[in-house]
Amino acid sequence: MQNGQTMIPVWLDKDLKTVKVIDQRRLPHDLIIADLKTVDEIIHAIKEMYVRGAPLIGVTAAWGVYLAALNSSLIADLEMECARIKAARPTAVNLAWAVDKIMADVRRFHKINDKIQPQLIQSIRKAANSISSLEAENCRLIGEHGLPLIRAISQKKDGNTVNILTHCNAGWLACIEHGTATAPIYAASDAGIDIHVWVDETRPLNQGSRLTAWELGQYGVKHTVITDNAGGHLMQHGMVDMVIVGTDRSTYTGDVANKIGTYLKALAAKDNNIPFYVALPSSTFDWKLQDGLQEIPIEERDPDEVRYVYGLNQGEAQRVLVPPSDSPAANFAFDVTPARLVTGFITERGVCDANAEAILAKFKNDK
Amino acid sequence: MQNGQTMIPVWLDKDLKTVKVIDQRRLPHDLIIADLKTVDEIIHAIKEMYVRGAPLIGVTAAWGVYLAALNSSLIADLEMECARIKAARPTAVNLAWAVDKIMADVRRFHKINDKIQPQLIQSIRKAANSISSLEAENCRLIGEHGLPLIRAISQKKDGNTVNILTHCNAGWLACIEHGTATAPIYAASDAGIDIHVWVDETRPLNQGSRLTAWELGQYGVKHTVITDNAGGHLMQHGMVDMVIVGTDRSTYTGDVANKIGTYLKALAAKDNNIPFYVALPSSTFDWKLQDGLQEIPIEERDPDEVRYVYGLNQGEAQRVLVPPSDSPAANFAFDVTPARLVTGFITERGVCDANAEAILAKFKNDK
């Protein structure tokens, strides 16, 4: 592994029966590894966000299919478990993508009433492993393709610090290695480019201040945590050179679902002529949807995630209630940034414009 | 007083020596009244945000001038204390406005080496009281002038709920009574119009979730706390009919300094054709500045306000650290929304467009 990353966020234990995940709800103050042995536990970990981020949700779901195969008798049972896994969260398209990718092969060679044989279990394990490796490799390539964008800004600024703003966590914690939005940042850091990252804290769950800040700190990348409110002001005053975010689902027409608040940053970037890039592996494209704003389902989560904030008090992890106890709250988890606000996508096959023509030209066999 | 407001946020005690303020840092979980007996204590309360919000900072500063007069021998000493009060915070223009309004009269009738007589102290007390009453009355008038805007939306929607989004707290806690942004909301509520308020939590100090939610709840106005990230999504989906915010300083050309993040909401309102109003008493106009973005000083506050979140844990008020302990943070307190994004100002003299011509036509004697 590389500097600052000595683990991956999900893996199969040597016992071949336990999926291990970092419980990301507790970072950065506690590093807790959770053991998942059943499909119920996989679903719980996805729903409750022990794991989060589109690629990681996909890989965890793939391991869920493996646990389902391990604990089912018939293909029919496996299918039912897969349907439950796919329903765990609605917005990230990687969830269904990973499950269907494994099941496509299963369905090709098995009938619904077939018994599940050890050989099939072994091949599903290999398939889940492949998805994990594929996402890691895709992220590495995203870094490779994003690096020239940062290098060009650095050169234009005569080697002065390149300031990049990111929202939420699209780092290795959200993927497997490298991350999506962070991959070009890590690549630039490795290449010796002087960079600094503005980290949106990303309310309500603070994936920016808890996870991205932690990742960047571990890797030795200069960064500053800011409120989600601050990015517009920084952009107005020339303190942001580029925005890079991840995505939970993007349409092949270029609309981008990502953590709530992304749309506001995209508007500010546009208003200040700052490039706004979305980094993603092709597994995050939805080849069926045309209109992201109308068609991508936006998850509504527990309002208590807004009302309570988790952090450290005198060395102890606690959560505190911020608003009056009787004030209601709402918790929309994602928003959709229309393609017109996106400068480009950074993918494992290179950078492309945010429109159907450009995206399909790069991924014509995938739709 | 009115339903839900049984106190004002700053007043002079009967002993005529103590300024009493609600310590707003502790709301809604504790209602603590702080005693301020010296200019140092007034400055501390303004800097540390026991009191906040442009009109309230102005009124508190006015009481600071009174305490300064009470504890000074010469006009020269009083002048020095006034200079210190004016420097307590940089962005809200009401601070200097209130001090200068009182001192204009003092300067007219006294030389710098004059002794301060009891009669002068009494007249400064009356002047401070007048400023307090003036701000309360101006807010009442803002409510009166803003009400028709809300009524028109209500009628257009056939009496269905009018959804108003607000950022930060521009309620009676930020003013004296009624508030600025909340004045039309309270007026609409009194008029029986069906309204609901989306309350931006307003990071980092959560004046929305702590103060505005508390005020609205006390008054019986339907409201929902949301993250600062959520407003764009709500606007994209027709869930916001109107935005009303306050301001800490607006140029006579229509640029609006307000709590950090206001600019992002203004961009989203523009992008979705939603009216974006700024409510203010004329004391918040800066008649000297033309270009808000370049000229209004933006306060940078302690980064720990971003890093730590204050709330309630098992009945006890505590603060928790969210990011890694070694991650730096930045804390810009305000941003500037350019006039082009502002639908109009709601003032004590009526509604006007956000440009010099319209503003000066209404306030031609004030510049």
Image (cartoon, coloured by chain):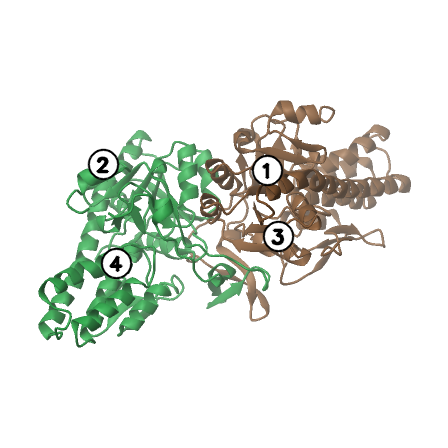
Chain colours: A green, B brown
Q: Which labelled disc corresponds to residue A96?
A: 4
Q: Quick check: do tags 2 and 4 share a chain?
A: yes
| Circle 3 residue | B212
Q: Which labelled disc corresponds to residue B277?
A: 1
State whether residue A7 appears in this view.
no
Residue count near mark 2 (Cα–Cα under 10 Å), binned few <14, some 14–19, many ≥20: some
Query: Is residue A37 positioned above or below A347 on the image?
Result: below
* Quadrant in the picture for residue B143: top right
Which amino acid, mark 4? Ala
> CA–CA distance between discs 3 and 1?
17 Å
Q: Are marks 2 and 4 in contact (CB under 8 Å)?
A: no
The residue depicted at 85 percent of the width and 31 percent of the height is B110
Which amino acid, mark 2? Ala
Q: Are marks 1 and 2 in contact (CB under 8 Å)?
A: no
The chain holding disc 1 is B
* Quadrant in the picture for residue A1: bottom left
* Quadrant in the picture for residue B135: top right
The residue depicted at 69 percent of the width and 23 percent of the height is B361
**Residue A37 pos. (x, y %):** 26, 74
Secondary structure at badge 3 equals helix
Relative placement, left or right, of A227 versus A80 is right
| Circle 2 residue | A358
Nearest to N terminus: mark 2 or mark 4: 4
> CA–CA distance between discs 2 and 3?
46 Å
Q: Are marks 4 and 3 in contact (CB under 8 Å)?
A: no
Q: Are marks 2 and 3 in contact (CB under 8 Å)?
A: no
> CA–CA distance between discs 2 and 4?
24 Å
Q: Which labelled disc corresponds to residue A225?
A: none
> CA–CA distance between discs 4 and 3?
41 Å
